[in-house]
Amino acid sequence: MSLKPHHLDNVLFTPEKIQSRIDGLVDEISGGEKSDNLVMIGILRGSFMFLADLVRDLNAHDVHPRIDFITLESYYGGTESVGKVEIRKDIEVDVTGADVLLIDDILDTGRTLQFAVQHLTDKGARSIKTCTLLDKPARRIVDIEADHVGFAIDDVFVVGYGLDYDSYYRELPFIAEVTFI
Ligand code: XMP
């Protein structure tokens, strides 16, 4: 590992806390208007675990979406303002006329989610709702909010439950702050 020295002692969300918030999110989502053409799209790679837990819980509420993923990559230059988003791998399901629920791990500057919403609008989705596990409102550059938010957090770097530091730690069942030492 060539990571800078750090520790993960500050656990922000335990597995139990995450699961309990997912139950709440699923109540919100399944309590809304029912769709006969729901497509859930996870933004990779960070959302894989969150989406997997959401859909299992939604199944218990008799919600049966089609599921796909899009791989997006954000680029940041010397300053944040030059950040741009590119598609590494697009969705394969046809979302024409579909009600899309877009799932992301964390809403930071907002560029990724804004890009994904525009992309799916261009593909002909009938409606698009967004759901992010974490939200860092202090970091927002683009004017976008998610329809469903798991937890709002301060401007700290976090890993676990799908989120990574240089591709490590995605497998952790909890979410912890990365503290550099
Ligand atoms: P934007 O700025 O487009 O970024 O809203 C969203 C993406 O940035 C990554 N990100 C993080 N990843 N810990 C991570 O592991 C963090 O604290 C963090 N903050 C932002 C993430 O890929 C997210 O989808």
Image (cartoon, helix red, strand yellow):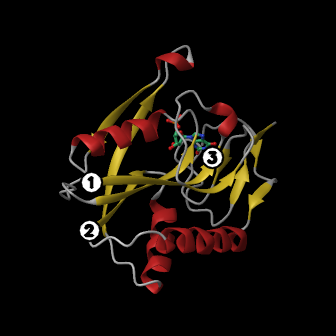
Q: Is residue 88 left or right of residue 83?
A: left
Q: Measuring from the top left, give residue 109's x and y in whole percent.
A: 56, 32
Q: In whole angstroms, how far apart are the C-alphas of marks 3 and 2?
A: 27 Å
Q: Are marks 2 and 1 in contact (CB under 8 Å)?
A: yes
Which of the pair 125/131 is nearer the observer? 125
Label at residue 126: 1
Q: Is residue 29 left or right of residue 65?
A: right
Quadrant for ligand 1?
Answer: top right
For residue 34, what is the image quadrant?
Answer: bottom left
- The residue carrying pointer 2 sits among few (fewer than 14), some (14 to 19) or many (20 or more) residues within 10 Å by Cα, namely some
Q: In whole angstroms, how far apart are the C-alphas of marks 1 and 3?
A: 25 Å
Split into 4 quadrants, where in the image is the N terminus? top right
Q: Measuring from the top left, give residue 83's x and y in whole percent.
A: 47, 23
Of badges 3 and 2, the one in the foreground is 2
Split into 4 quadrants, where in the image is the C terminus? top right
Label at residue 135: 3
- The residue carrying pointer 3 sits among few (fewer than 14), some (14 to 19) or many (20 or more) residues within 10 Å by Cα, namely many
Q: Amino acid at mark 3?
A: Asp
> Which residue is at 69% across, 34% downward?
138
Of badges 1 and 3, the one in the foreground is 1
Question: Mark 3 falls on what kind of element?
Answer: strand
In the depicted structure, whether residue 9 falls above or below residue 37: above
In primary-sequence order, the first of circles 1 and 3 is 1
For residue 65, what is the image quadrant?
Answer: bottom left
Please name the residue that numbered disc 2 is placed on.
Answer: 37
Q: In whole angstroms, how far apart are the C-alphas of marks 2 and 1?
A: 9 Å
Q: Amino acid at mark 2?
A: Asn
For residue 121, what is the image quadrant?
Answer: top left
